[in-house]
Image (cartoon, grey):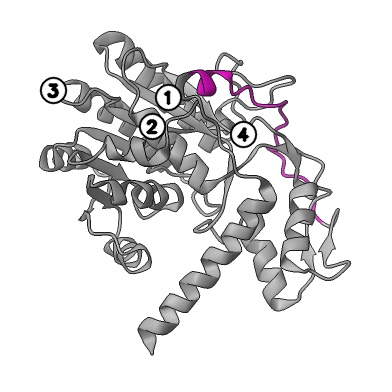
Amino acid sequence: MAQPLADVVRQYAGRRVLITGAGGFIGRWVARLLQPGGAELLLAARSAASLESLGRAYQFTGRTMVSDLSEAGSFERLYRDARPHITFHLAGYGVNPEERDPQLAYKMNHRLIKDISEIISASRMDDWPGVRLINAGSAAEYGAVPGPVTEKSPENPVNLYARTKLAGKLALDGCIQRTGLRAITARLFTVYGPGEHGHRLLPSLIEAAHTGHTLALTAGEQQRDFTYVADAAEGLVRLGCLEGAAPPVANVATGTLTSVRGFAETAGKVLSLRPGQLNFGALPYRPDETLHGAVNTSLLEGLLGWKPPTSIRSGIEKTVAFRAGMKNECAEVGS
């Protein structure tokens, strides 16, 4: 049986927790989960604006640090200043459509994680029994998998983002083998929820509900493991507390596949979209679209006694409620 989340979070009380990419989609949710337990949060992001908006939206009390991790030596300075017990490395490059610079992709997703692993392995933190580094990986590293996806499935990435993320993961694996660093790459699948980038599926559906416009979509036959963002963050937080042997990689997913069309239709019901507002088949599939079978979550469940529990309908409803609550809070602040 899974340990209650409140008990997990309390294990971080008084610990220095560094979160890179703290202003991003996943980072802010990891911070949101950890703050009530008394962790000493060290929130790092590339811009002061993202950290300021993070503070206003989530009322974080942690220490914020602006650091452009693409600059040589930036993480080492950050790490030596923060002296964290555990680092959640959630910064990356290439998820958003405008991020297509190959040099920057390799710098952020490959060379940076290589540097991070070497820096952390060279430092000592004997009073923290858990994992020293949680690295956010991606399902895209697998590429197309004809059957079930396990941590041992062949890796065949098909785009720049996936190739560079895999290169970073392999560099981290090498450091683990050489130094014994306690680190895990947590491979995330199709994460959705509050804070998601506006070009993605659920924000586009919510925007269509707001404007009443017809939304052009693919046929939507591709199957995805949709994971609610708070569940994905919880998986990272739980993995960080692992004592003893830690696997180099763990899939964080629900284990259930849903078609993109099924997800959109469920959202349409929650959002009360009108008939015909979802125009399936109006767009072609992406050339780098990858298909895979169900994600095997047996390793995750064996480690934690837990896997992401939120249903798609519940996750969409929570997203809508969260957005409404944020708008109300902003209105009260401005009044």
Nearest to N terminus: mark 4 or mark 1: 1
The mark that comes first in sequence, 2 or 3, is 3
Q: Residue at x 33, y 69 (%)?
A: 56
What separation in Å lies between label 3 and label 1 (alpha carbons)? Answer: 22 Å
Instruction: State the SS at label 2.
Output: strand
**CA–CA distance between discs 4 and 2?**
19 Å
Q: Which residues are magenta?
A: 283-302
Q: Residues within 10 Å of mark 4 (few under 14, many from 20)?
A: many
Decide which of 115, 125 is in the foreground and name it.
125
- 199 inside magenta stretch: no
Q: Mark 4 or mark 2: which is in front?
A: 4
Numbered mark located on residue 124 in the image: 3
Residue 287 belongs to the span the image colors magenta: yes
> Sequence-wise, which precedes: disc 4 or disc 2?
2
> Do the numbered discs 4 and 2 sit on residues whose CB atoms are within 8 Å?
no
For disc 1, the marked residue is 169
Question: Which one is closest to the eye, mark 2 or mark 1?
Answer: 2
Q: Please name the amino acid that badge 1 sits on.
A: Lys
Give the distance between the C-alpha atoms of the residues marked 4 and 3, in whole angstroms: 35 Å
Of the image marks 2 and 1, the number of the one nearer the N terminus? 2
Q: Position of residue 197 (x, y in %)?
A: 53, 57
Residue denoted by label 4: 254
Could you tell me which residue is drawn at 67 percent across and 48 percent down? 312
SS assignment at label 3:
loop
Q: Which residue is mark 2?
A: 135
The residues tagged by marks 4 and 1 sit, at their Cα atoms, a distance apart of 22 Å
Three-letter amino acid code at disc 4?
Thr
Q: Taking 120 as reference, is 259 above or below it? A: below
Amino acid of disc 3: Arg
Q: Are marks 2 and 3 in contact (CB under 8 Å)?
A: no
